[in-house]
Image (spheres, grey):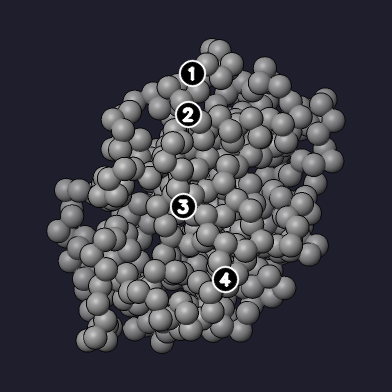
Amino acid sequence: MQETFVVGVGMTPFGRFPEASVAGLAGQAIDDSLADAGIERSAVQGIAFANATQGALEGQHGIRGQAALDGMGFGNVPVVNVENACASASTAFHLAHLFVGSGAYDCVLAVGAEKMVMPDPALSMEAFKGSWDIHRRDITLAELGAMAERLQPPPDVAQNEARTVFMDIYAAFARHHMALFGSTQRQMAAVSAKNHGHSVGNPRSQYRRAFSVEEVMAARSVAWPLTLPMCSPISDGGAAAIVCSRSVVERLGLAPRAVRIRASVLMAGDRRDPDRIEQHVARKASALAYQAAGLGPEDIDVVECHDATAFGELLQSETLGFFPFGEGGPAAERGDTSLGGRIPFNPSGGLESKGHPIGATGLGQIFELVGQLRNESGGRQVEGAQVALAENGGGLRGIEEAAVAITILERV
């Protein structure tokens, strides 16, 4: 593998845009990434296009990338379509890294776009029903139910009927973790309040309102212990990144703002004993990424992780090796993962507040971290950031994510 570099990034605001289209969102992100890199479309030799829901929501089951990019001036450049649930965009980025790293191409565009906000809200929920093995639905529900039963919710808590199945999945994970380690709902509320506070400084965030821990705790319950501010919203959005070889970086004079990809690891989840949390797929994938980069958690300055719920960040702060299992919640309460803390997580606001257009989410993380490493993040800048890590998970296999992507980036 030869060295690979991110030379340009682009991202639309994430939010609810009734008039937007997959093509429009992708086009805006692509235009911004090309302008950021200062290169022309003719430099792009290949495209990895990520989308997870357009088939279910609009009937565009095939050639989604070719359809979305039609007329954008890329001509006969090859397009690879990527669907990997919520990890689709980071999978596209991983492929761009592999295409360039192998020497097959010198410049590859990774782009993800998702149009999830539909006139009928019930239709938006349909997008999540195929991100687990539908033939094992009853078995999976039984496994999740056994995890959730380790800790019963308070008898007076009402559940929200309008929720995706993945909120129930995260609730089961959270209750299992609470039973194993004594983690608390308040600790999850601390994660949520922190991320909503971070999002105030991000003009591309879907929500930019700060919440106190008490406000998060008092909000409407979605699936106990998760309240509404702890959960990511339905979102539209697009994001893109341009990955190039060193020869392109040097020939075009892109080194001053290029960011090196130190590691990119993609791994599938597997079946395991729920109590063997140290065997979690994100623990295994991050270990490979650290090994490939020649680094450890102590070398990372800033993290964007997959917080589809606040519990997701709490768990990933442990599986990625930043805190021992059971210590992620107390660390969040202490402010260790806040801006200015020991290891800032989700300075963008995370999925809970920035938004979660699932086919664009992973590249949205790359957008944020490239800005951090360039020292271009304004009021949410992590001072002196040199090395960054992104974790993006998608779907469900057994009792863990079906796909996890870990990316480590470094300022050149």
Residue 140 coordinates in the image, percent (x, y): 21, 60
Closer to the eye: label 2 or 4: 4
Seen from the viewer's position, the closer of residues 355 and 272 is: 355
Residue 38 coordinates in the image, percent (x, y): 76, 29
The answer to which quarter of the image holds residue 167 is: bottom left
The CA distance from mark 4 to mark 1 is: 40 Å
Q: Nearer the N terminus, badge 4 or badge 1?
A: 1
Residue 185 coordinates in the image, percent (x, y): 41, 81
The answer to whether residue 263 is left or right of residue 164 is: right
The CA distance from mark 2 to mark 4 is: 32 Å
The CA distance from mark 2 to mark 3 is: 18 Å
Residue 211 coordinates in the image, percent (x, y): 53, 74
Q: Amino acid at mark 3?
A: His
Tell me the residue that label 2 is attached to: 23
Q: Residues within 10 Å of mark 2 (few under 14, many from 20)?
A: many
Q: Nearer the N terminus, badge 2 or badge 3?
A: 2
Q: Residues within 10 Å of mark 1 (few under 14, many from 20)?
A: few
Tell me the residue that label 1 is attached to: 70
